[in-house]
């Protein structure tokens, strides 16, 4: 009998204009658009294989956040994993990653969430404001995976989502479909 397809919901969050939509579009549609259109919100579906298992990812591309934006309940309840995006050329956007992670933790009343911290626009190395060592440190503090990526040059784009599935799955025990620690997850 074929193995059951696993459905996982992933929310992509971060400050404005860091490249969230471009990352998701490159992953789903294999295209990069140079112009900037602020996102309201959009959901995408894509099938992937991870460690020989079939997954259907529902990916929520969200509107850019600042420190004062309230966390939309839609991005806390029922979400299996998070991609927290900043731009390597913006220190402010890097600082938003910790703020967002803390907001999600507070909202969900948990101590740990499956997440990958993605340093976007890695092609902009000449304008870099955030070093890889800082990304490594924040990822370690938050028990998160991390990667730098460029939607423009299609570097590490698939890896972002593979890592997110990895973080979701490593918190699951056996065939359980719901992360034990994540009380926010209502199916
Ligand atoms: N150089 C470079 N530019 C990028 C990259 N990804 C996105 N951009 C540009 O950055 C701008 C913002 O990209 P978006 O993908 O719309 O950013 P966003 O985070 O979805 O923006 P909001 O919807 O406002 O939150 C656009 O002009 C993109 O072309 C990248 O990998 N490299």
Image (cartoon, rainbow, N blue to C red):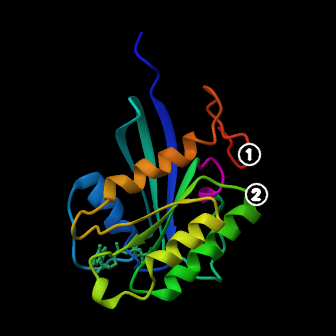
Residue occupying image coordinates x 65% and y 32%: 173
Q: Secondary structure at mark 2?
A: loop
Q: Is residue 44 left or right of residue 96?
A: left
Residue 177 within the magenta-colored segment of the rendering: no
Residue 154, given in percent of the width and then of the height, sits at 24, 63
Q: Earlier in the sequence, mark 1 or mark 2?
A: 2
- Marks 1,2: beta carbons within 8 A: yes
Q: Quadrant of ligand 1?
A: bottom left
Q: Position of residue 70 (x, y in %)?
A: 66, 74
Query: Tag 1, which secondary structure?
Result: loop
Prevailing SS of the magenta stretch: loop
Which residue is label 2 attached to? 111
Number of marks: 2
Query: Residue at the spot x=43%, y=43% of the render?
Result: 57
Q: Is residue 85 left or right of residue 186?
A: left
Q: Which residues are magenta?
A: 74-79
CA–CA distance in space, label 1 to label 2: 8 Å
Locate residue 85 relative to residue 126 in the image: left or right: right
Question: Residue 130's quadrant in the figure?
Answer: bottom left
């Amino acid at each position: 009998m074929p193995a059951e397809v696993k459905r996982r919901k992933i929310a992509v969050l971060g400050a404005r204009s860091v490249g969230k939509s471009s990352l998701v579009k490159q992953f789903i549609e294999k295209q990069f658009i140079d112009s900037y259109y602020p996102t309201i919100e959009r959901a995408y579906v894509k099938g992937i294989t991870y460690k020989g298992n079939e997954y259907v990812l529902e990916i929520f591309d969200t509107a850019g956040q600042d420190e004062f934006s309230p966390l939309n309940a839609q991005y806390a309840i029922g979400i299996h994993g998070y991609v927290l995006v900043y731009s390597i050329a913006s220190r402010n956007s890097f600082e938003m990653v910790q703020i967002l992670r803390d907001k999600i933790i507070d909202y969900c009343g948990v101590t740990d969430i499956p997440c990958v911290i993605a340093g976007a626009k890695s092609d902009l190395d000449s304008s870099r404001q955030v070093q890889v060592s800082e990304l490594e440190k924040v990822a370690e503090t938050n028990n998160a995976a991390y990667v730098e990526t460029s939607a423009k040059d299609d570097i590490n784009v698939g890896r972002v989502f593979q890592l997110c599935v990895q973080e979701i799955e490593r918190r699951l025990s056996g065939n359980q479909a719901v992360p034990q620690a994540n009380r926010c997850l209502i199916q």
